[in-house]
Image: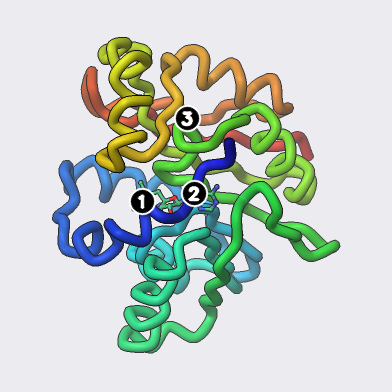
């Protein structure tokens, strides 16, 4: 069964109001990403949610296209980008499984809090690798519950059926890094701010 946007549509307003759990780690991830950006870059963000990170990154790149399958998330993102007066940012309602990239490809692809939500991580990573130009950048932040909450494998499906949780795939940080390497990326940064925190990985496609 395909993951559905229903859970995220319901959550969108609350998600927007929820403060970032670890502001210092978030700032460090932004800085590590922006240090690799330049103002000619064409960037894609998958699963952009309400667009907060896209809005912060846009001034550092040529253009950022942000995609999410939740109409409500994208609705909020569009309003925020318009209010912020960010011109080089576009949004699209699309599922990452069916998203059709432009033929010229991207200089960077971002997947922040997304890879644990997709059914086939290896297939998505391989598609992202294909969408990148040579030397292109992959930026990910991923919940790796397999390292500390293996129980989620059992309770996750029940939570999903009750509408309390999105579908979450359970894997370890090592399994995540292995899948990123297997898709063809060289890992430049692999950082976990705390035992239970999301794993932040920056990968690079060979030039
Ligand atoms: C945990 S939120 C992360 C949002 C944002 N990237 C952030 O870091 O705050 C996950 C987002 O991914 C989106 N999403 C999940 N599965 C998706 C899919 N198959 N295609 C497109 N978007 C998806 C959800 O709608 C949600 O907005």
Task: Compute the Cα span from label 2 to label 1.
Answer: 7 Å
Is residue 50 in view from this perspective? yes
**Crowding at label 1, few (<14), some or many (≥20) Cα neighbours within 10 Å?**
some
Quadrant position of the N terminus in the picture: top right
Quadrant of the rendered image containing residue 2 = top right
Q: Nearer the viewer, residue 11 or 40?
A: 11
Task: From this view, report whether residue 36 is shown above or below residue 64.
Answer: above
Name which quarter of the figure residue 160 lies in.
Answer: top left
Asked whether 11 or 135 is in front, the reply is: 11
What distance separates the C-alpha of mark 2 from that of mark 3?
Answer: 31 Å
Determine whether the residue tagged by mark 3 lies in a helix, strand or loop.
strand
Against 174, residue 23 (above or below) is below
Q: Is residue 65 above or below residue 176?
A: below
Of 121 and 152, nearer the camera is: 152
Q: Which residue is mark 2?
A: 4
Q: Which structural element holds mark 1?
A: helix
In primary-sequence order, the first of circles 3 and 1 is 1
Q: Nearer the viewer, mark 3 or mark 1?
A: 1
56 relative to 91 in the view: left or right: left
The percent coordinates of residue 113 (x first, y second) are 40, 42
Residue 35 appears anywhere in the view:
no
Q: Which residue is mark 3?
A: 189
- Dot label at residue 204: none
Residue at point 16%, 56% (across, down): 18
Q: Mark 2: few, some, or many residues within 10 Å (few <14, many ≥20)?
A: few
- Residue 120 at x, y percent in the picture: 62, 30
In the rendered structure, are the residues bearing label 2 and label 1 in contact, judged by CB atoms less than 8 Å apart? yes
Marks 3 and 1 sit apart, C-alpha to C-alpha, by: 32 Å
Mark 1 C-beta to ligand 1 under 8 Å: yes
Residue receiving disc 1: 7
């Amino acid at each position: 069964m395909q993951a559905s946007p229903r859970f995220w549509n319901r959550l969108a307003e609350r998600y927007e109001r929820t403060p970032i759990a670890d502001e210092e780690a978030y700032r460090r991830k932004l800085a590590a990403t922006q240090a690799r950006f330049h103002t000619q870059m064409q960037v894609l963000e998958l699963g952009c949610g309400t667009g907060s990170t896209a809005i912060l990154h846009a001034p550092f790149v040529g253009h950022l296209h942000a995609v999410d399958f939740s109409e409500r998330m994208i609705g909020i993102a569009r309003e925020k980008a318009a209010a912020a007066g960010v011109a080089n940012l576009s949004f699209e309602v699309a599922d990452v499984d069916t998203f059709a990239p432009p033929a010229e490809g991207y200089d960077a692809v971002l997947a922040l809090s997304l890879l644990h939500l997709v059914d086939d991580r290896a297939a998505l990573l391989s598609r992202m690798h294909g969408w990148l130009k040579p030397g292109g950048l992959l930026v990910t932040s991923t919940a790796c519950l397999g390292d500390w909450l293996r129980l989620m494998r059992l309770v996750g499906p029940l939570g999903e059926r009750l509408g309390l949780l999105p579908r979450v795939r359970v894997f370890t940080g090592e399994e995540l890094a292995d899948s990123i390497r297997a898709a063809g990326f060289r890992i430049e940064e692999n950082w976990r701010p705390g035992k239970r925190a999301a794993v932040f990985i920056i990968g690079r496609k060979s030039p």
